[in-house]
Image (cartoon, helix red, strand yellow):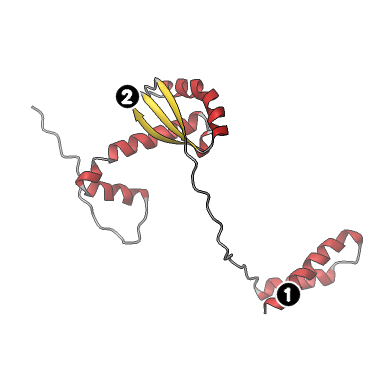
Amino acid sequence: MTMRAPSFTPFKQSSPFTKTAKGAAEFLRSHDKMAALLPSITRMAALQKDCAAALPAMFTHCAVLQFEADQLVLSVPNAALAARLKQQCPKLQEQLLQRGWQVNAIRLKVQVSKMLVKSTASNQLVLPSQAVSAFEELSEALENSPRNQALKNALGSLMQHRRIAK
């Protein structure tokens, strides 16, 4: 009977501000129950990557939900994309077989995600005074012609807005 070296690596605390993939993997390895998930996570990430490589344009909004008993279940954000992806399933299955994945069936599951609510508070960009003075100089240097009028109006509006903001 051959003895194998243990694959468990204890967690080593580095910097509290380290938020890298390597740090996440170290964290998962440090807990017994979490370490058991790491091979599945790695496998699903590899499958997600291979699916995205097979259908790059369509797979940007899709995700691998499950892969058990040679059946692949994909999450699709809407029915329209599901219909288009369903047409591409034979191609996806063939590409995955070539990459070593034994996929006998592909199921699509429409999962509408929550819409992100735009915050009402917007970040105001502040122009440095040097930039504002450069715009003022540009506005004064432009000749009065129909071609330059739209730009002069925009620069005037910017200067007016800047004066109100102060």
Residue 143 shows up from this direction: yes
Q: Residues within 10 Å of mark 1 (few under 14, many from 20)?
A: few
Whether residue 56 sits left or right of residue 104 in the image: it is right
Whether residue 126 sits left or right of residue 62 in the image: it is right
Callout 2, which amino acid?
Ala
Residue found 27% across the figure and 47% down from its top: 28
Residue found 48% across the figure and 33% down from its top: 52
Report which residue position mark 2 lands on: 69
Residue found 49% across the figure and 31% down from its top: 53
66 to 122, vertically: above or below? above
Q: Nearer the viewer, mark 1 or mark 2?
A: 2
Q: Position of residue 22 (x, y in %)?
A: 33, 48
Q: Position of residue 131 (x, y in %)?
A: 69, 71
Task: Label 2, secondary structure: give it.
Answer: loop
The residue sitting at the right extreme is 145
Report which residue position mark 1 lands on: 133
58 to 162, vertically: above or below? above
